[in-house]
Amino acid sequence: MDELMWLEDFEPGQTWTTPATRMTEADIVEFGSRYDPQPFHTDPTAAVDTIFGGLVASGWHTMASMMRLFVDHGPRPAAGLVGLGVDELRFPRAVRPGDELHLVVETLGSMRSPRNPERGTIRLSLRAVNQDGEEVLTAWTTILVPARSSDETMPGGPELT
Amino acid sequence: MDELMWLEDFEPGQTWTTPATRMTEADIVEFGSRYDPQPFHTDPTAAVDTIFGGLVASGWHTMASMMRLFVDHGPRPAAGLVGLGVDELRFPRAVRPGDELHLVVETLGSMRSPRNPERGTIRLSLRAVNQDGEEVLTAWTTILVPARSSDETMPGGPELT
C-alpha cells in the first residue's frame, strides 16, 4: 500500500478494500452547510419532511470522504491521484448519520498514451459500501499515471529505467 | 430564480448562469487537507515540484463549490436537488488560487417516469468556467423532479393539481 505504482503495475482485477469511515451528523451538517445547503443536508428536524425523511449526506460529501479513503488507503500512482474524469457516478442509496462506509477500488484496465508513451491512463471502479454491505456510491474514474519505462515493447521494471 | 420548478417546467435549452465564486488558497488547502490530502492540494511550496507546478484545487472541491452555486443561484426543483447520478465529469483545466468560477446550467431534456407519472427526471449540463472564459469542469447530471400533474396527456399547470 505504501509503494508508488507506475503504469505497468496496474492490472485488471486488482482490488483494494479500505478501512471504514464514519459519517457523523456533525460532519454531514458541516459539509452541507458549506457546499450543499438544502434542508435534508443541514437540518435534522426540517429533513424529516423532505423526500429523504431525515438527514442525509450530500453526495459530494460522500464522494469527498471516499477520496480521503482512497488517498490514505488506496493504490498510490507515482504522480499522485491526477483524476482526468469520472463516469457513471451513481448514488444508489442515501447515506445517513452514523453510517460507516468503506471503499473498494478495482483496476478495470490501463492504456499507454500513444503520443506520450512515458505515461498513460488507468481506469478504476470505485464502490462505497455501508455497514450493511449496501452500495451507496459507484463510479468509474480515469487517472493519469506515469510509466516506469517508455519502451512499449519491454515489460516495465525498475531495472529498465 | 426563486420559484420552485416542476417536471413540466423544464425544457431543453433553458440556461442559468450564476455569479462567480473565488477559489482562495486558504479554502483550497482547507478542503484538500480534510478530503484530498496530496501535496498539490495542501502545500503551496511542495506543490511546485508536482505535475501541476503549483497549488491546485481538488476536483471535488471544485465540484462542491459548483454545487453551492447551483443551490444558491440555479434552478430550484420542487423536491430539492435530488441527484441520481453524474456522467462524463471532466476536469479540462486546473483550478488555481484566486480563480473566479461561475457555473452555467443548461437543461438537456426531461422524462416522465413510466411507472410513477407523478415524477420524472431531468438531465442537465453543468459547466464551470473561470475568469478567462475557460472551462475547468464539465458534467451531465440527472435529477429527480416531481411533476405538477400526473396526467400525462395534460399540460402541467398549478390549476390542474
Image (cartoon, coloured by chain):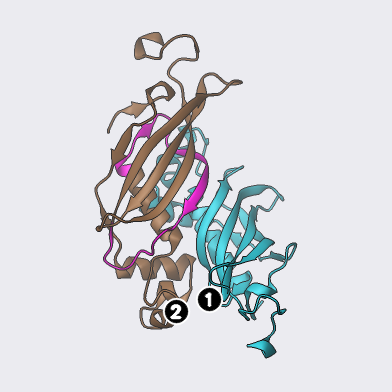
Chain colours: A brown, B cyan
* Foreground of the two, A86 or B113: B113
Q: Using the image, tell me which numbered label, if any, was put on residue A50.
A: 2
x, y (%) of residue B6?
63, 76
Q: Is residue B114 above or below residue B138?
A: below
x, y (%) of residue B73?
62, 71
Amino acid type shown at disc 1? Ala
x, y (%) of residue A155?
41, 12
Find numbered disc 1 in the image and state the secondary structure of the residue it sits on: loop
Circles 2, 1 touching at the beta carbon (< 8 Å): yes
- Label 1 belongs to which residue? B79
Quadrant (top left, top right, bottom left, bottom right) of the N terminus of chain A: top left
The answer to whether residue B42 is left or right of residue B59 is left
The answer to whether residue A85 is left or right of residue A8 is right
Chain letter for mark 2, please: A
User: For the magenta stretch, what is the residue range?
Assistant: A71-100
Q: Residue B146: name its quadrant.
A: bottom right
> Residue sitting at 72 percent across and 51 percent down?
B133
Task: Using the rendered image of the protein, determine whether residue B33 is visible from the camera's viewpoint.
Answer: no
Find numbered disc 2 in the image and state the secondary structure of the residue it sits on: loop
x, y (%) of residue A119?
51, 24
Chain letter for mark 1, please: B
Q: Is residue A98 magenta?
A: yes
